[in-house]
Amino acid sequence: MERDLTIGLIVKPQGIRGEVKVKPYTDGAESFRGLKRVFLDGEERKVLSVRCGADAVYLGLKGVPDRNAAELLRGKELTIPREEAPDPGEGRYYIADLLGCEVYSDGGTLFGVLTDIRHAATDIYTLDMEGKEVLFPAVKGVITDIDLSAKRITVDEKRFREVAVL
């Protein structure tokens, strides 16, 4: 498992006082409220303030006093140590833990390796099937089991073939 979890992307400065606008990679912006620190390129930054918007989080970070300093952070990803991340809850997983899992049919056939997850109304999983990219939505009935310790995802083959974009 990854030691650090990527939780968001700094998209731009916000205002003139060094605040940054962050696109969250989490289920919701509210999960940022409890953060005391984040890491940028391995460097620790204390979180001074957190504001949540509809689709973004606005952070004030120590060492970022103005818009010019915030501009230098554009495009950087925020990470936190795994031990500081909240438990994702029953039946929920961190994307970093799912990437690299082998995807099998319920009959035991290896389909490929999970390479990407895109956020949409329903998450879209990208599977590498022998060099070919296959997309499928993570809708009810497609994924039947996830075993992180074995790095294995099992899908209902019939349902998978109905919804996958081959």
Image (cartoon, rainbow, N blue to C red):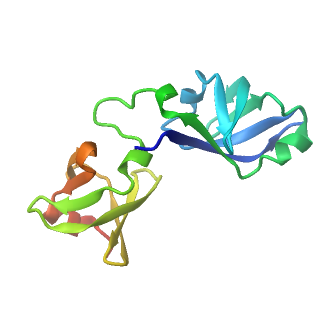
Answer with left or right where residue 121 lies relative to residue 147. right
Left or right: 25, with 13 as reference point = left
Q: How many marks?
A: 0
Left or right: residue 52 versus residue 119 is right
- Using the image, determine if residue 30 lies above or below residue 67: above
Q: Nearer the viewer, residue 151 or 93?
A: 151
Query: Is residue 102 visible from the viewing direction of this image?
Result: yes
- Against 140, residue 59 (above or below) is above
Query: Could you tell me which residue is drawn at 66 percent across and 37 percent down?
Result: 39
The answer to whether residue 142 is seen in the rendering is no
The residue furthest left is 107
Front residue (pair 71, 41)? 41
Rendering quarter of residue 102: bottom left
Quadrant including the C terminus: bottom left
Q: Residue at image x 60%, y 23%?
A: 33
Q: Is residue 125 left or right of residue 140?
A: right
Q: Closer to the camera, 9 or 40? A: 40
Q: Position of residue 103 (x, y in %)?
A: 25, 60
Residue 20: percent from the left, percent from the top?
A: 76, 38
Residue visible at 38% across and 46% down in the picture: 97
In the depicted structure, whether residue 102 falls above or below residue 85: below
Q: Quadrant of the N terminus?
A: top left
Name the spot of residue 131 as percent of width and height, x first: 36, 78
Rendering coords of residue 73 (x, y %) = 78, 46
